[in-house]
């Protein structure tokens, strides 16, 4: 397929190991398609366990000199990488829309968001302070230093093909670690383009490696069983996260897990309804509903239930659906057939159980992977749209009466990633924020991701935090040194 990139060298089809572009030993490739059109984009090297082992060995060797650099030396290279990504934001955005489907404006937004982690950790890496601890004995002194944990493995999903990589690679590299990245087989092009930019920025051979392939179990098996890899950072589904945690147990690796969510979006009687409608649009329909922090359940208090539902439906019906490269499009395709079939099944099963379709409720005529933005009302806690992560442009509305009831419904899930609520009452804002069993709570806003704040979940939504001053510690170990005989 002809791609109109300003810099044609950003379209890479080989994997990147030890500073070199490589094919699979078997010479096998896999095709990648544009979800909006079904058209073939290109074929990408299909690597397996053996090449993964080579990447791990390259990362291990490269770590010797990478960790010996000063934090400032690493920071200079990372800042260059950040600059190159910002310069290439339109090309990267286009690559993303073509392989992932999100509207171009959103894609360019993700490139900037993704790049912001590189800038942030280029700076944070210089502040990995240790402590001098007041001693317990007159002839001894105690200090701590922070050291890079070792070779890092990152396994990333397709819904944020740039940001999910930079959120892991930037703190790892800033801390002095080296990394082997396995991007999703659905979206390898953004990962490879970023590797090319890292190469140009002067990231030394072996420090950052990208292993592309369709045999996720083989690549993941190698990454998790290798004693050289000391840390796994994973973003993806909860079942795969649980499996990887088990696999990491044998070599006692540190893990960070960003898994599924089931975000409640609560609208109280005292909310600014127009603001809540806009927040719900941003939170629910961004990326066609395919983010782990997307509002999954809209809980609306009885007094504003009808007004909110009507205003939201009006706004949703105006949304433009189509190919993400078309200007003005707000909702693109879902990633693949399994994704749209799942959404369709969840909606149909819930409607059978009594949910009412306010708008949408069906596939969209634009193409095979398009689903019409949907709102369901009369939703109960037993319905599959309530209990499962929808990952599509479907908003189920649940009516509630009291604040206590809202918190109880919101917490009625094994997940605990993001929660949102709208209220104008200060005391309620505190009570509800504290009562929600979630790692992140947004009050009167529908978007909460930023590189300066800690992203992460509780319960089965995961462990660890990405971004912010806390994100660096995920890639550092504390060493305690006792100085005796003083
Ligand atoms: P999603 O629903 O976002 O595709 P997955 O958890 O299936 O979630 O995928 C996230 C990442 O995990 C992808 O890179 C995928 O290839 C990878 N993956 C899937 N299964 C495994 C596995 N058994 N071992 C290692 N990685 C896996």
Image (tube, helix red, strand yellow):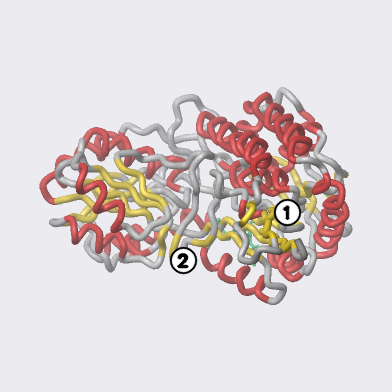
Q: Is mark 1 within 8 Å of ligand 1?
A: no
Q: Can residue 362 be seen in this view?
A: no
Which residue position holds label 1?
A: 148
Q: Across the whole image, how many numbered discs are drawn on residues?
A: 2
| Residue 19 x %, y % | 86, 44
Q: Residue at x 30, y 51 (%)?
A: 433
Q: Which residue is drawn at 55% across and 49% down?
A: 470
Which residue position holds label 2?
A: 460
Labelled pair 1, 2 in contact (Cβ < 8 Å): no
- Give the foreground label among 1 and 2: 1
> Quick check: which quadrant has ligand 1?
bottom right
Q: Can residue 139 be seen in this view?
A: yes
Residue 199 horizontal side relative to residue 109, left or right: right
Earlier in the chain: of badge 1 and badge 2, it is 1
SS at badge 1: strand
Q: Quadrant of residue 8?
A: top right
Q: Quadrant of residue 288?
A: top left
Distance from disc 1 to disc 2, alpha carbons, whole Å, reads 27 Å
Mark 2 residue crowding within 10 angstroms, few (<14) / some (14–19) / many (20+): many
> In the rendered view of the protein, which quadrant contains the C terminus?
bottom right
The residue lying furthest to the left in this view is 303
């Amino acid at each position: 397929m002809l791609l109109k990139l300003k810099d044609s060298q950003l379209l890479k089809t080989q994997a990147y190991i030890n500073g070199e572009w490589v094919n699979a030993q078997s010479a096998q490739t896999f095709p990648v398609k544009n979800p909006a059109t079904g058209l073939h984009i290109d074929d990408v090297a299909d690597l397996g366990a053996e090449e993964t082992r080579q990447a791990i060995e390259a990362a291990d060797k490269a770590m010797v000199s990478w960790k010996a650099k000063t934090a400032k030396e690493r920071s200079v290279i990372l800042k260059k990488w950040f600059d190159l990504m910002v310069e290439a934001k339109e090309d990267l955005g286009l690559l993303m829309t073509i392989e992932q489907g999100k509207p171009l404006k959103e894609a360019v937004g993700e490139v900037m968001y993704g790049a912001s982690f590189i800038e942030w950790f280029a700076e944070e890496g210089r502040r990995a302070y240790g402590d001098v601890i007041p001693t317990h004995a007159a002839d001894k002194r105690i200090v701590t230093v922070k050291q890079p944990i070792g070779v890092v493995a990152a396994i990333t999903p397709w819904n944020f093909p740039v940001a999910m990589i930079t959120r892991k690679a930037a703190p790892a590299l800033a801390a002095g670690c080296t990394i082997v990245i396995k991007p999703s087989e659905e979206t390898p092009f953004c990962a490879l383009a970023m590797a090319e930019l890292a190469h140009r920025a002067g990231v030394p051979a072996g420090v950052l490696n990208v292993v592309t392939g369709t045999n996720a179990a083989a690549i993941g098996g190698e990454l998790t069983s290798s004693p050289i890899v000391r840390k796994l950072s994973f973003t993806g589904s909860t079942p795969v996260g649980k499996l990887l945690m088990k696999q990491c147990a044998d070599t006692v690796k540190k893990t960070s897990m960003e898994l599924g969510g089931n975000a409640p979006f609560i609208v109280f009687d005292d909310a600014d309804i127009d603001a809540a409608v806009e927040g719900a649009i941003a939170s629910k329909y961004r990326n066609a509903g395919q983010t782990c922090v997307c509002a999954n359940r809209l809980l609306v208090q009885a007094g504003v239930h009808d007004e909110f539902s009507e205003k939201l439906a009006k706004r949703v019906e105006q949304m433009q659906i189509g190919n993400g490269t078309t200007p003005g499009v707000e909702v693109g395709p879902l990633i693949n057939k399994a994704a749209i079939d799942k959404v369709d099944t969840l909606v149909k099963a819930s409607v059978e159980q009594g949910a009412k379709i306010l708008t949408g409720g069906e596939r969209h005529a634009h193409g095979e992977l398009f689903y019409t933005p949907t709102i369901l009302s009369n939703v109960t806690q037993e319905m599959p749209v309530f209990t499962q992560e929808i990952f599509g442009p479907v908003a189920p509305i649940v009516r509630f009466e009291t604040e206590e009831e809202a918190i109880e419904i919101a917490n009625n899930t094994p997940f605990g990633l993001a929660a949102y609520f709208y209220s104008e009452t200060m005391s309620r804002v505190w009570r509800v924020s504290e009562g929600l069993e979630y790692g992140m709570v947004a009050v009167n806003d529908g978007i909460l991701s930023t590189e300066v704040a800690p992203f992460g979940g509780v319960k089965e939504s995961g462990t660890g935090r990405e971004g912010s001053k806390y994100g660096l510690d995920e890639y550092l170990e504390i060493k305690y040194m006792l100085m005796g005989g003083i």
